[in-house]
Amino acid sequence: MYKLLEFEDVIRIPPALFNLPLKDAAIEVLRTNYEGRIIRGLGLAVSILDVNVDAKGIIIPGEGATYHKARVKALFFSPEPQEVVEGIVTVVAEYGIEVRLGPVDGFIHKSQIFEKETFSYSREQEYLLGEKTGKILRRGDVVRARIVQVSYGTRRLRLRIGLTMTQPYLGKLEWIKEAIEVKKGAKKKRSSS
């Protein structure tokens, strides 16, 4: 989910930052350029951790800034398909739920909440209710899900994460605990027979 990545870049240090040590100026520029931005194939740049800057810069005639080669260490949020994640339900709607996964939200369509179950939406109470099982999902619930899709959008770069909770031991944490207890009870019953 989170990755430490190293990459090279050429950074522009504007004259307004010349009063800072070169490394501090470089980190400030890199944080402005990268932090909070989505980079296709890498994910969301969370933080610039360190930088090694070439002290020899280049000045372009007519421009006051200097350009320096830099080796950057950064922390990225990089979701992978099939990865199991936990998050908090932030939005409950007729079509499904959104789950906060650290710095971004993932989406679970209501058909992917629980296997062979139909969920109906209560607008007044803002929850999804399972018609057969009576299971309820509301904002603030903690869930465990598996990533089934990661896409970066087409027009504007936007990280979209599709999730599912239909497999065993996925879903609202209370549902998982119940399933484990049922399984333990079934094992004890078989071993005592």
Image: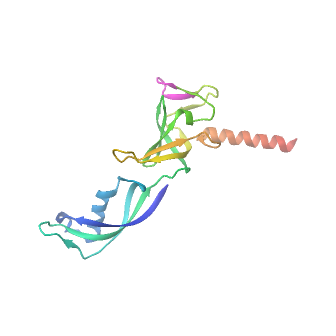
The residue shown at (49%, 35%) is 97
Q: Report whether residue 172 is seen.
A: no
* Left or right, 157 with reference to 135: left
Q: Is residue 126 magenta?
A: yes
**Residue most toward the right?**
193
Range of the magenta residues?
121-129
* Quarter the C terminus occupies: top right
- In percent of width and height, residue 77 lies at 44, 54
User: Is residue 23 in view from this perspective?
Assistant: yes
Q: Is residue 192 above or below residue 65?
A: above
Residue 35, position as x, y percentages in the image: 34, 56
Compared across the picture, whether 108 is left or right of 76 comes to right
6 up-or-down from 177: above or below: below
Q: Is residue 183 left or right of residue 158?
A: right
Residue drawn where x is 38% and y is 56% of the image: 45
Residue 7: image location, x then y, percent: 38, 66
Give the percent coordinates (x, y) of residue 152: 41, 48
